[in-house]
Each structure stands twice: as structure tokens, then as C-alpha cells.
């Protein structure tokens, strides 16, 4: 095999691998993270407040549920290192390696910051409760 043919083959193989990885990522199922905010200084009684975060990398969507309140994030950043999202009143950041979470809530005259930890959950089909 000539040197040119070897380089061409390597480029084609790398291109095909990159295309298959992109396809796999784009068709990935949504991921649910069950999080517990543990910061006791943010709000009294919030030391065990559950937050459910659902990330759909294929659709590039990020949402969260805090009790009865649901949030859909409009500005989203997804990388191999972190997941970040913001909307008008909330921002969240999740470190992918430790699954630590930072949850910030914005009000007219103050910002409340809470910290916690997440663990992978199971995304239920639409209409069924989350597990």
C-alpha cells in the first residue's frame, strides 16, 4: 500500500468513526438524574430537597422538577465535563464526573445558591411517573 493510500484510508476510517459516534449521541435516550440539594444555609428545611433533572442530548433539551415546580432551560451547555442550563430564574450546573450539582435561584434582590449530589435514574415513558 502506498503512503497516500494509507493516509486516505486513515482519513476515511476516522470520518466514519466520527459519523457513527455523532449518530449514537444524537439518538441517545434522555438521561434522568435524581438529585438532592444538601446546602442547609440556603433555605431552612432544604437540606434534603429532591430535584429531578432530565437531559436529552439528542434533542438538546434540559429540564428539572423541584417538587410541583417544573423548569425548562433555554440556554444549555453540554460537554463531556459538565451540564449547564439557565432560564429567567434558575441556573444549574452538574459536574459529570462527580455528579455534584449547583442550583442557583434568582429573585429581585438576592441569589440563593444550593449544592448537592445526583445519581442516575430511569426515565419513564411519557404519562408515567418518574422512578
Image (tube, rainbow, N blue to C red):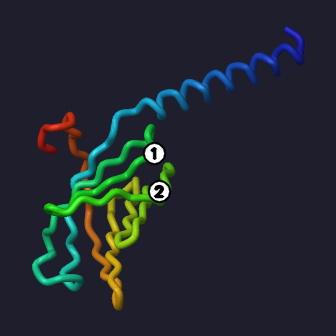
Work out whether mark 1 precedes mark 2 in sequence or the reverse, and give the earlier one. Answer: 1
Residue 46 lies, in percent from the top left, at 15, 75
Q: At which x and y percent is residue 123?
A: 23, 40
Label 1 belongs to which residue? 60
Q: For marks 1 and 2, give the CA distance.
A: 8 Å
Residue 86 vertical position relative to residue 29 in the rendered view, above or below = below
Against 101, is 45 above or below? below
Quadrant of the rendering where the C terminus is positioned: top left
Describe residue 131's horizontal placement relative to residue 26 as left or right: left
Residue depicted at 88% across the width and 17% down the height: 3
Image quadrant where one finds the N terminus: top right
Foreground of the two, 121 or 123: 123
Q: Which residue is mark 2?
A: 76
Per the image, label 1 sits on a secondary structure element best described as loop
Residue 41 position by quadrant: bottom left
92 sits to left or right of 45 = right
Q: Residues within 10 Å of mark 1 (few under 14, many from 20)?
A: some
The answer to whether marks 1 and 2 mark residues whose Cβ atoms lie closer than 8 Å is: yes
Amino acid at each position: 500500500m502506498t503512503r497516500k493510500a494509507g493516509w486516505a484510508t486513515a482519513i476515511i476510517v476516522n470520518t466514519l468513526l466520527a459519523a457513527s459516534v455523532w449518530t449514537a449521541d444524537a439518538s441517545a435516550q434522555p438521561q434522568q438524574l435524581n438529585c438532592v440539594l444538601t446546602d442547609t444555609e440556603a433555605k431552612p428545611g432544604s437540606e434534603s430537597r429532591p430535584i429531578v433533572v432530565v437531559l436529552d442530548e439528542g434533542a438538546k433539551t434540559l429540564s428539572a422538577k423541584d417538587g410541583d415546580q417544573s423548569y425548562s432551560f433555554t440556554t444549555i451547555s453540554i460537554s463531556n465535563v459538565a451540564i449547564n442550563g439557565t432560564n429567567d430564574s434558575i441556573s444549574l450546573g452538574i459536574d459529570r464526573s462527580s455528579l455534584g450539582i449547583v442550583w442557583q435561584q434568582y429573585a429581585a434582590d438576592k441569589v440563593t445558591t444550593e449544592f448537592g449530589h445526583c445519581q442516575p435514574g430511569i426515565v419513564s415513558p411519557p404519562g408515567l411517573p418518574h422512578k
